[in-house]
Amino acid sequence: MGAIDLTLLDRGRVHADTNFVVDGDAVATASDRDPDHDYAEFVVWNLVIETPETTILWDTGSHPEAGDGYWPRPLYEAFAHVDAADHTLEGDLGDAGYALSDIDAVVMSHLHLDHAGGLKEFADTDTPVYVHREELPYAYFSAKTAEGSIAYFAPDFDHDLNWQVVHGDRSQLVPGVELLHLPGHTPGLMGALIRRDAGNVLVVGDEAYVDANYEDGQSMGAGLLWSNREWRSSLSYARDLEARHDATVILGHDLDRFRRVRDEL
């Protein structure tokens, strides 16, 4: 453990049908053929991890022009980042007291549109960008072919970046910050176990979009899962880490939990 400070950045709101996030949230039945759908609000966030050695940015959020034609229309129709233009990476970092030049390293949990849209700020720089070995090729495969996942958009990550490839299931980034491989949502999804004097934190991220995924084990919709089997294995692993390390858990897009954890940090 050590003197590690954490700052959660609020990067705005995505509006989407809860059925995408919690499988079968609203389904037709014989007696109710037209159920009400929950069109809900979800948070996009980044995390600044400040250690004695380095200042790390966890993810980069959506591109600020997501709603102005930058995102492919079908993606925006499904997951509308309604205020992306009001949440530039530079601006939200500035509100928290940081400049882009303060960031020594970037960790990409994965390369979906709502996480990789700010990578352009680190193009043509020496800033290391950490990504899991299983994520980078799948992102290019998906973005450059008709197969894979439609949630990868090449203009987000196809830059001259100082990629640093993370291998294996667990990898220490710096003392107190351990990267975790949590496949399921994507093949190379990463979380982190952050050990600190003020209390341990487990970054689960998009392994669980909301509390119902994490606490109740309710699967996300099929469109958000690369592998259901791997997702369930990663969920069990994350819960075990939470218990063993008495850790505060940060989920992917749960707005209520985000607000609660931000206040606790």
Image (spheres, grey):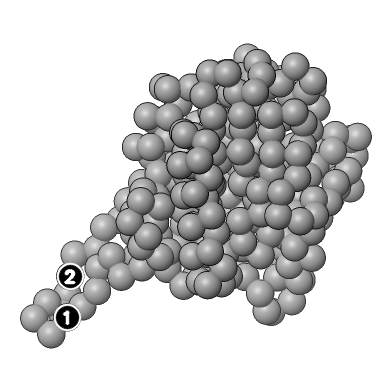
| Residue behind mark 2 | 35
Q: Is residue 157 left or right of residue 69?
A: right
**Residue 29 marker:** 1
Give the quadrant of residue 226: bottom right
Q: Residues within 10 Å of mark 2 (few under 14, many from 20)?
A: few
Q: At label 2, which amino acid type do we have?
A: Pro
- Front position in the image: 122 or 48: 48
Are circles 2 and 1 on residues that touch, CB within 8 Å?
Answer: yes
Which element is circle 1 on?
loop
* Position of residue 213 measured from the top left corner of the image (x, y, whole percent): 39, 56
Q: Tell me which numbered mark, 2 or 1, is placed earlier along the sequence.
A: 1
Where is residue 19, by image quadrant?
A: bottom left
Residue found farthest to the bottom: 30
Using the image, determine if residue 200 lies above or below residue 167.
above
Residue type, label 1 = Thr
Number of other residues with Cα within 10 Å of mark 1, as a class: few under 14, some 14 to 19, many 20 or more? few
In this view, the residue farthest toward the front is 244
Question: Is residue 72 visible to the viewer in this orientation of the structure?
Answer: no
Q: Nearer the viewer, residue 87 or 194?
A: 194
Q: Position of residue 257 (x, y in %)?
A: 38, 37
The correct choice, above or below, for 145 with respect to 122 in the image is below
The N terminus sits in image quarter: top right
In the picture, the disc for residue 250 is none
Which residue is at 17% across, 75% downward?
34
Q: CA distance from mark 2 to mark 1?
A: 8 Å
